[in-house]
Amino acid sequence: MGKILIKNGNVILENDIVKADLLIEDGRIAKIGTIEDSCPTIDATGLHVSPGFIDIHTHGGGGHDYMEGTLEAFVQATTLHMQHGATSIVPTTVASDTDYTIEFLKNFEKIKKSSQIPVRLLGVHLEGPYLSLKQKGAIPAQHIKNPDKEEYMKILNSSSSIIRWTIAPELEGAEELGDELYRRGINASIGHSSAEDFHVHRAVLHGFRSVTHMYSMTSSIVRINCYRHPGINEAAYLEDELYLEAIADGHHLPQTLLKLMIRNKTPEKIILVTDSMSAAGFSDGLYYLGNPADQQQVLIKNGVGFMPDMSSFAGSVACCDQLVKTMLKLELPLYEIIKMISLNPAKLLHLDRELGSIAVGKKADIVLFDPSVSVSMVMVDGVVRYSKEKQ
C-alpha cells in the first residue's frame, strides 16, 4: 500500500487540535509531527485532519434503504455518506418478519465483502422488533412484539454480523435477551421504549449500554395521581455506563436538549448519529423505510422526515457532516464534537484500539474538511476514497 504524507493540516486529536503532518504507511498512521518524506503528499493547509466519522445508526441514503438487501443499495447509500465524511457505517434495519431479517443478514454477509463498498461495514444494528407500541414512531406496528427466545436465538445464530440491537427493556423477556447479547459482545440499546426509571436501572444490570436516539421515542416523566414516574429521559443521566445517541440534524433535538445532554453526560458519553433514511441526499417527496414489502412511507418536507400523518419524525436526511455543523452552533471545541462521532462510537463497539481517533498505530481512516465542515477528502485504510478535486 505504500506511504502517503498529509502535510500542514490542523490535526484533530482526542483532546486537542495541533498543526502537524501525518505519515500513513500500509494503511495505518505511522507518525504525527513535523515530517519530511519523498512519498506522495497531500497538502492540507487550512484544513482539519480528522478521524473518519462512524455512524452506528443509519437506514440508508442516496435513494436506497439498506433493507433492500442489494449490492446497489449498499453502494449508493454508503457512497453518499462516505462523501460526507463517514468511513465506518453500521447499517440499521427496521423491525420486520423473522425470515426477512435473516435473509437480510445473509445478504449483508455477502455484500460486506464487495470491493465496491467504499467504507467499513462494521456490522448490523437491529432496531426492533422487541419495542413498545406506544413508542413505535416509524416502526411498522404489525412487527412489534415481546421478545421470543426461540425467535431471537434463531436470528442471533444465523449471523455473526449483528453488533447492536435496540430493545424496549420493560418488555417481558427483554432482560434475558440483554444477558444473551452481553454474553455475545453485542451492544444492547434502550429504545422505542416506555420504560420507567427502574426499568432503565435493571437494563444496565442486564448489559444494556446505550440509549437509541435520546428524546426520540424514549419515555419521560409522567404523573400518575400524585406520584411522578421518571422515564428514560431522566434515568439515563444517572447511569454512568450508558452512552446516549443524539440525532443532531438540527430538527430532532433543539439546542436546549443537546446542551442538557452534554452537560449531564459530558461529551465522553454522547454519540452523534444520522438515523438517515433513503431520502438522504434527495429532495422532498415520499420515500420508503425498511423492508420494501412493508411499504412503510416517509414524507420528506422541507428537508425533514415525517410519518405521512405528521405524528412523528421518521428518521432524517442528514449525513455526518451535518451533525458536526449542528454541534458547532453550541460553541463546543471541535475536538469534543469529533469525539462524539468517532471515538465514542468506537468505544461503545469495542473497536477503539483500531478506530476512532488519530493515533500512531491506528487504521488510517481520515477526513479532511474546511472550517465550514465541507469535506474535501476521505481516506479509508490509507486509500483515498473521495477527493473533491477529482469530482
Image (spheres, grey):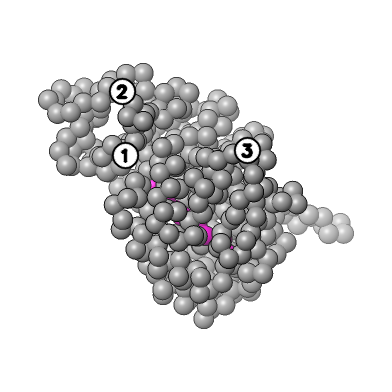
225 over 12 or under it: above or below: below
Question: x and y percent of residue 179 in the render?
Answer: 49, 70
Residue 304 marker:
none
Spatial CA distance of label 1 from label 2 is 16 Å
Would residue 145 appear left or right of 103 to someone viewing this image?
Answer: right
Q: Disc 1 marks which residue? A: 385
Q: Disc 3 marks which residue? A: 303
Residue 344 located within the stretch drawn in magenta: no
Residue 92 located within the stretch drawn in magenta: yes
Quarter of the image with the N terminus in it: top left
Would residue 172 appear left or right of 153 to someone viewing this image?
Answer: right
Residue 163 visible in image: no
Task: Answer few, some or many: residues within 10 Å of disc 1's Cα (few below 14, many 20 plus, some between 14 and 19).
Answer: some
Spatial CA distance of label 3 from label 2 is 32 Å
Q: Are marks 1 and 3 in contact (CB under 8 Å)?
A: no
User: Which quadrant of the view contains residue 163?
Assistant: bottom left
Q: Are marks 3 and 2 in contact (CB under 8 Å)?
A: no
Q: State the SS at label 1.
A: strand
Q: Disc 2 marks which residue? A: 44
Q: Are marks 1 and 2 in contact (CB under 8 Å)?
A: no
Residue for point 30% across, 58% down:
113
